[in-house]
Image: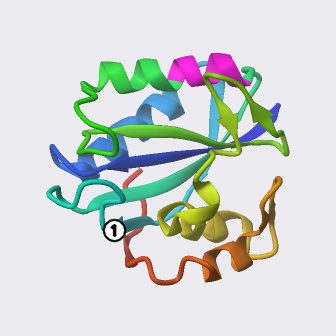
Amino acid sequence: MSSIFVGIGSNIEEPMDQLAIAYSYLRDHSLMQTLAASSVYLSSPQGPDDQPDFYNAVVRIHSIVQPMALLKILQEIESQMGRVRTRRWGERCIDLDLLLFDDLILHSDKLDIPHPRAHERRFVLDPLIELLGEAYALPGQGLLGQLRSRCSEQAIRVLCEFPE
């Protein structure tokens, strides 16, 4: 089974509830086993600033599913939860990002692993550090702790434990 890390984010329609619902979809999927969830972090939006702050977390799962099939599953969960893509980096009820898939480095027209902006976003790095530690090497990018120090100006705070 592969060790996979999925980013979960929301900033509209009761974000804490959205995170819990997304987690339940992952937990209950027959091809996945959820292992751990980070705390929930609150961060400013990375895109347009005329939207609410984001609630973010990372979930670690094990699965036999291959990366492209997992991407499809994540997109289906987003669709079932009512995600509508209105503008790039805009508000959303749910966002599921495939961050890491074992130590795989993959670049295709539909999927990049690790996530192409994971190394520059505190709302991804801090939860990953919580689950993996600062000394974990993000494939092709460097140690998580060093990567976090490069984006220390980004405002982020731990909000609470994950609502499983």
Quarter assignment of residue 33: top right
Q: Relative to 78, is 16 on the left or the right?
A: left
Compared with residue 127, is residue 8 higher up or lower down, i.e. above or below? above
Mark 1: which secondary structure?
strand
Q: Relative to 72, is 9 on the left or the right?
A: left
Q: Could you tell me how many numbered marks the image carries?
A: 1
Quarter assignment of residue 93: top left
Identify the residue at image location x=68%, y=73%.
147
Q: Residue 148 location, x and y as percent?
A: 62, 76
Front residue of this view, candidates 109 and 152: 109
| 97 drawn magenta | no
Identify the residue at image location x=26%, y=44%.
90
- The colour scheme of the drawn protein is rainbow
Q: Relative to 114, is 34 on the left or the right?
A: left
Compared with residue 29, is residue 138 higher up or lower down, i.e. above or below? below
User: Badge 1: few (under 14), some or many (20 or more) residues near its Cα, within 10 Å?
Assistant: many
Compared with residue 11, is residue 130 higher up or lower down, i.e. above or below? below
Look at mark 1 in the image and give the residue it sits on.
42
Main SS of residues in magenta: helix
Q: Residue 9 location, x and y as percent?
A: 38, 49
Front residue of this view, candidates 155 and 58: 155
Identify the residue at image location x=47%, y=66%.
39
Task: Report the span colored magenta.
Answer: 67-73
Front residue of this view, candidates 51 and 134: 51
Q: Residue 130 location, x and y as percent?
A: 62, 70
Q: Residue 96 location, x and y as percent?
A: 46, 38
Figure quadrant of the N terminus: top right
Kind of residue sitting beneath label 1? Leu
Quarter assignment of residue 127: bottom right
